[in-house]
Image (tube, grey):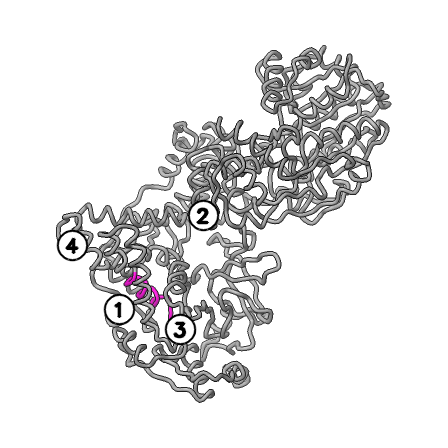
Amino acid sequence: MSESTFRSAFPRWCLSSSIDQITFSYRPLAWTTDRDAIIATFFNGGRTGFSTGDPSRLMEELALVRPSSFGGPPSIWNKIYTEFKAALSLITLSHSPEVIETEEQHLLQQFSKLIPNRCKTISIGGAKASPVILNFMKRCFTHCTVIESYGISECGGITCDNDVGNALQYRLESIPDMGYTLDDKPFPRGELLVKTPHMFSGYINNPEETHAALTEDGFFRTGDVVELRTCHNVLPSLHVVDRKKNFFKLSQGQFVSPEFLQGIYIQSPFVHQIYIHGDLLADSVTAVIVLNQAYAQAFSLNHNLTPLDMNNPDPLFYGALLQDLRSIAEKESLRKHEIPSRIIIDFQPFTSENGLLTSSMKPCRHKLAAHYADRLKTTSITIEQQLKTIIETATGQSMSIDKEDNLFLANGGDSLSAVRLSRMIENDLGIPIPLNILFDPKMTLQQLTTLIQDPSQLSSLSQSLVPQLLNDADLDLNITIGKRKITSDCPSMIFITGTTGFVGAFLLAELLTVYRGECKFVCLVRCSSSTKALDCIRETMLFYQIWKDDYQDRIIALQGDLAKSCFELDNETYELLAREIDVIFHCGASVNFVLPYSQLCGPNVCGTREIIRFVTHMPSACIPIQYISTMSVLPPDVEKEISIEETSPDRLTSGYAQSKWVAEKLIVKASRCGLPVVIYRLGLICGDSRSGACNQNDLYTLLFDAMMRMGCYPETALHGDVNGLPVDFTVKTIVNLSKVQPDVYGNVYHVVNPNGEIGFEDVIQAMRSCGVEMKSVCGEEWRMKVKTIADENSRFESVREFLFDSAFRERRKVSSVEFSNAGCLSDFPSVDKVYMFRCVSFILDNIVHK
């Protein structure tokens, strides 16, 4: 380290203070933490007490020195916590909950005395800290300020309580082989690179290591994997996942952070110390546990078990310990391979004397692995066998192990099964597999096994779909645009698609209301027969409380398929419709936020192409289209009502958004050729303002349904809001615009609510007004409850990630200037507490209780 760099820290050390500064030095002075603390204390006229170096006397010496501040690695705080936890657990074994709560507070007061009153600041650093330990420290040592520090000898301090200061220069680099990338959701992850004023010059006489540690532009590779969290109006924060070199790989190729798992399993009252071990031949981790002997003996006595034997523990004792670890894993949402499948029990603690702890009191992993080598040997089944079992469980069908067998589509694959399969593969084998790979018709069991063994191949298979999207959008429509049909105020026949969907059903009801008399409505429905087609429409409209019996005589329900040539209609019917239809409202689409583009291309892209071919089928006259699109076709930073030709699909991530982008491109392409088209991009469409009838498959309906079933909501919800447009007002404005501007084409309208936000607080109040007891829970408890309800009810399984936290994120605001200028907002219904009460009542009566 250069002299100038060393001197630059002096002002930071020489902070004037009226407090008598006393430091306790117990770690190697090769560590900058203790060395700098001693120098700073000297400069400030303070005193330093030095440890004897005997770890067993550390707390005794701490009480003698009584420093004004004290910092330690997680191992020290872990030991204090395990002693506290063991003492509390002994009380738990034999007392009622009321007594336990009182005794816990008494124990906290006793343990708080371990840190002398003169000490006003305590810190934890040197390695990743467990949230459990941090929470304990804040509850116990209330007379101190608790700080989580993160720094490195080579470059000094980096963060304090995870916060990144304005002066720190840093960036993240993806580690794709380990599954940590800048594209990770909800936050980017990767190796942290930093540049600070206190950077070292290099390693003495070791130019190779120096070169490897520093980038060409002078950033230091910390070797730490971090998550960069960013929130609105809050400085970014860096959260350490683990040391890169600490990760190990299991047989399926997934990487495991042992330090992370050790920080979680330390919660068990059985555990005094724990070492998490991984093996390339194993499909899950193994735990070496040094028992908390006081608790283990008390537990054995209470359950009349045989005396403890580390080589042959009582099966009941072993089972209770394993079950306790599994319960903790479930609470912390760990994946299956992160749950120990085997436990090795020991009574001898890890210490620096026996070499199992380093001099800085960290577990010495290579020595621990060597020490327990004989007991860690294991066997494993093949990945292919595990994968076959997972697929059969997810799809509910058996499959052969034939190398040529299709993996998923031939085994009952649908969107729900796909989500379940993807999640099971990630949980059990540790590798996230994109849905487009599972739906690849050429994917076989053997190929997927190879991908799991070598995940680096995933990046090439999951390459951007942009070239395909651009190619599909540039499809030669092979159409001739004839003279436009003259649309009168009273059309005789209207073709409408998507009438078994939410918006489509309300659009049909509005058209039936506006165009009375002899006007007929042709509705294409994918079903088994034309009789069934009308039944599907009736059932949908009955559910949404908008069906009237006199509608039946005016609806011509046809069995057909949008994505198939000529809609799978016979030639005579197709020709007749092409002559008689006056206008088309194309609302039909497969709205699915799970399926990849390959699965939605048929109904959404091919279906739109068939509509274009249909309306241009008659060379003498083309049929105008009122086309229902979605705001999802716009990239995140686009707000204005621009043409789809001015946007790029680069940042569209869902198959639904991609397919609708291509479909709108085809519509606009036909429009450029002369086809009369008006485009309506719908935002969030909410329940009917009169009845509260909601789309039962809408994301927010699912959210409100889940909240009422669980009787709770996350505390973060109160800061959010919902911005939507009632469906009855939506269809009224679409029909009104198509009617009052029959000769205006080429417009793009953003059918969104510019000012109709309603807070989640009002939503929750509406639920309470409906007689549902609702309570606030922390984020961790909310995620656990969501996981449970998703596991128990397939209705919520495919939207689990949305329910976790996406539902409460801030939504972007988009322009609705064209929509507003068209004069559509004069009779806008109130989106208020009364409206919310109607929506919640509908969900409660027709969805939750059905």
Sequence-earlier tag: 2 or 3:
3
Instruction: Tell whether 560 sits left or right of 664.
Output: left
Q: Secondary structure at mark 3?
A: strand
Does dot 2 land on a helix, a strand or a loop?
A: loop
Q: Residue at x 38, y 78 (%)?
A: 118
Nearer to us: label 3 or label 4: 3
Closer to the camera, 312 or 134?
134
Give x and y (percent) for residue 51.
31, 80
Ranked by sequence position, the earlier of labels 2 and 4 is 4
Q: Which quarter of the figure has residue 802? A: top right
**In the rendered image, which residue does mark 2 sit on?**
454
Secondary structure category for the residue under label 4: loop
Q: Distance of mark 3 from mark 1, alpha carbons?
A: 20 Å
Q: Which residue is mark 4?
A: 308
* Amino acid, disc 4: Leu
Above or below — where is 729 with respect to 337?
above
* Residue 351: image tag: 1
**How many marks are shown on the rendered structure?**
4
Q: Is residue 73 magenta?
A: yes
Q: Against 220, is 65 above or below?
A: below
Q: Quadrant of the rendered structure where residue 497 is?
A: top right
Q: Residue at x 28, y 63 (%)?
A: 83
Verify CB contact (< 8 Å) between mark 3 and mark 1.
no
Categorize mark 3 by other alpha carbons within 10 Å: few (<14), some (14-19), many (20+). many
